[in-house]
Image: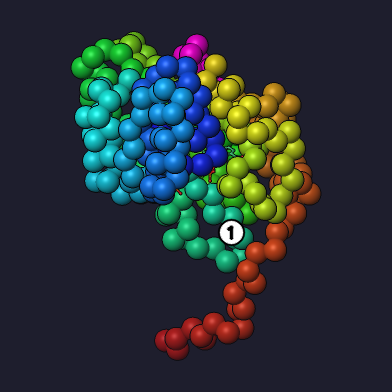
Amino acid sequence: VVTGASSGIGRELARQLAASGLAVGLTARRADRLDELAETIRRDGGRVAVATADAADPVATRDALQSLAQALGPIDVLVANAGVAINASALAFDPGAVRRTFEVNLLGVSEAIAAVLPGMLERGRGHLVGVSSLAGYRGLPGSAAYAASKAALSSLLEGLRIELEPRGIAVTTVEPGFVATAMTAGAPFPKPWQWSPERAARYIVRGLERERRLVRFPWPLVAIQRLVSVLPPGIYDRLARRIVPVPPFPDPPRHETLSPPPVQ
Ligand SMILES: NC(=O)c1ccc[n+]([C@@H]2O[C@H](COP(=O)([O-])OP(=O)(O)OC[C@H]3O[C@@H](n4cnc5c(N)ncnc54)[C@H](OP(=O)(O)O)[C@@H]3O)[C@@H](O)[C@H]2O)c1
């Protein structure tokens, strides 16, 4: 099963996994996109089923995974790929955007895992895959909630991996750099070494076939991230401000319009 299969990396992953002979379950919110992909896969001789769900809705997520298992059989591989990136300035800080980001990028993944893990444990085999990001290694200006959600996701997957591997369940954390998808189109920051979704999916599928614990790409960005992750905060902050110029976000709240504090 691939979540977030209606576009970008997830769509291409589902297509390539189906081409490799696996029966694939597709889920996301946009039914028309999923149906169109399913049609393509069927035309190429693949086995596929579709179920729509909002990843932020625990009941819908479990129902969707259950219906895919009914259609195709037990879920042996879960690729939790659905994700959102809400770019927002710290000057217009919105806890709702943080909540929404975590609901999809972290809690949505955890609901999907909870729906398939008991069956995997019973069968003594399975493969959990989470699509995190190289963005999770340091705080990111303009994408603070996104980076935090991916840091949490990578940590969650690592913790699960250590316990689940001896039970026959592989856990793979995928940490892409920039991939040319709807998520990054028009994003107000540089995207060095950007890969196409086809190339990214090919690299990920190869990593999944080998049950690698960590699939990260492209290597120049991985090397930079490694270096950046050990920089002291003062140096990192100056560097981050130069590389990610403050984007044209909405105007910051005007403090002079705030009501005066109540008189005690
Ligand atoms: N593109 C990059 O540079 C990059 C880099 C690192 C990591 N990633 C990660 O890769 C994953 C895929 O992103 P992408 O680049 O392929 O972006 P994308 O083209 O925008 O695809 C995002 C997918 O997630 C699904 N999705 C979003 N919100 C959802 C929700 N509430 N419920 C269910 N599905 C939802 C979307 O489907 P619907 O809208 O139909 O629901 C879509 O299929 C994400 O986790 C992203 O964080 C991307």
Numbered range of the magenta stretch? 207-215
Q: Image point 44% across, 61% down: which residue?
A: 96
**How far across and how far down the image is residue 237, in percent?**
71, 47
Image vertical order of residue 55 relative to residue 226, above or below: below
**How far across and how far down the image is residue 157, in percent?**
42, 28
Q: Is-magenta flag for residue 199? A: no
- Is 192 in front, or is 98? 192
Identify the residue position indicated by label 1 in the image: 88
- 167 left or right of 200 in image: left
Q: In the current view of this chain or complex, which residue is farthest to the front?
A: 43
Question: Badge 1, how many Cα within 10 Å: few under 14, some, many 20+?
Answer: many
- Whether residue 140 is visible, yes or no, is no
Q: Image point 30% across, 13% down: which residue?
A: 125
Q: In the current view of this chain or complex, which residue is farthest to the right?
A: 242
**How far across and how far down the image is residue 251, in percent?**
65, 72
Image vertical order of residue 60 relative to residue 158, above or below: below
The quadrant of the image that shows the N terminus is top left
- Whether residue 258 is visible, yes or no, is yes
Asked which quadrant contains residue 200, the reply is top right
Image vertical order of residue 166 relative to residue 144, above or below: above
The quadrant of the image that shows the C terminus is bottom left
- Give the amino acid at mark 1: Ala
Q: Image point 60% across, 29% down: which residue?
A: 198
Q: Image point 24% across, 46% down: which residue?
A: 59
**How far across and how far down the image is residue 252, in percent?**
63, 71
- Is 260 in front, or is 149? 149
How is colour applied across the structure in the image? rainbow
Label 1's element?
loop
- Is 94 in front, or is 181? 181
Asked which quadrant contains residue 66, the reply is top left
